[in-house]
Image: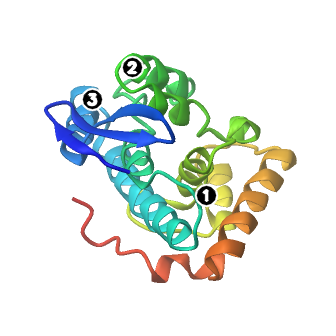
Amino acid sequence: MRKRKTALGITGKCGNIKMNIPTREECLELLKENKVPEEIQNHCKTVNKIAVFLAKKLKEKGVDINVELVDAASLLHDVGKREGEPAKGHSERGYELLKDKYPEIAQIIMVHAFFRIDQAKTWEEKIVNYADKRGHEKKVMTLKERMEDWQERLNMTIEEKFKKAEYEIEKQIFGIIGIEPDTLGEYIETSNMS
């Protein structure tokens, strides 16, 4: 895959499809421009570290995955969570913000929510969705811990079918990369999130 850095970011290829992928700096600027709260930006950075680690490990094992797309999409997955707006609907808001300039990233953002896990078909979609469920503001949690955190902190009930689907993706990923899911935090540096 050849890619070239442009004023608009990185133009990459996924198969025969050309795509426009923003640089890390452009992603961080988009988060700021869209008034994403600092704690959500920190969460996005943690999710990014998890997602990129997993994508690189999968690629090392021969999986066809676009690491650059995962990198940008994981940073931008919560771009629709703006200051003063409800979290509900943030996937749709993020999709609307990016669909014209970054349609592949917009698609990943649309399917990163728990209740859309069954719509995550590509490795890029699965990785960003899963990493979101493992990354807290500045730390890596187990899937179980994160779901319990959501249920307690947000008074949110997660349907069993969605929990089961997340654990199935976890099984797929870690079955390929060959590490135990609960040890993921040992591989991810979260102290410097900039």
Label 1, label 2: how far apart the Cα atoms are: 28 Å
Give the quarter of the image for residue 28: top left
Say few, some or many: other residues with alpha carbon within 10 Å of mark 3 (under 14 / 14 to 19 / 20 or more).
some
Percent x, y of residue 21: 33, 37
Q: Closer to the observer: label 3 or label 1? A: 3
Q: Earlier in the sequence, mark 3 or mark 1?
A: 3
Vertical side of 101 occupied by 154: above or below: below
Give the quarter of the image for residue 131: bottom right
Residue drawn 59% across and 62% down?
A: 63
Percent x, y of residue 52: 43, 61
Give, as a three-letter code, the residue at label 1: Asp
Give, as a three-letter code, the residue at label 2: Leu
Label 2, label 3: how far apart the Cα atoms are: 13 Å
Mark 2 lies on a secondary structure that is helix
Name the residue beneath numbered marker 1.
149
Vertical side of 174 occupied by 64: above or below: above
Say few, some or many: other residues with alpha carbon within 10 Å of mark 2 (under 14 / 14 to 19 / 20 or more).
some
Name the residue beneath numbered marker 3.
35
Which residue of the protein is positioned furthest toward the left in this rendering? Answer: 7
Mark 1 lies on a secondary structure that is helix
Q: Closer to the observer: label 1 or label 2? A: 2
Who is closer to the viewer here, 113 or 18? 18
Say few, some or many: other residues with alpha carbon within 10 Å of mark 1 (under 14 / 14 to 19 / 20 or more).
some
Name the residue beneath numbered marker 2.
97
Left or right? Give the position of 128 relative to 36: right
Mark 3 lies on a secondary structure that is loop
For the residues labelled 3 and 1, say whether their Cβ atoms are less than 8 Å apart.
Answer: no
Q: Earlier in the sequence, mark 2 or mark 3?
A: 3
Vertical side of 123 occupied by 97: above or below: above
Q: Earlier in the sequence, mark 1 or mark 2?
A: 2
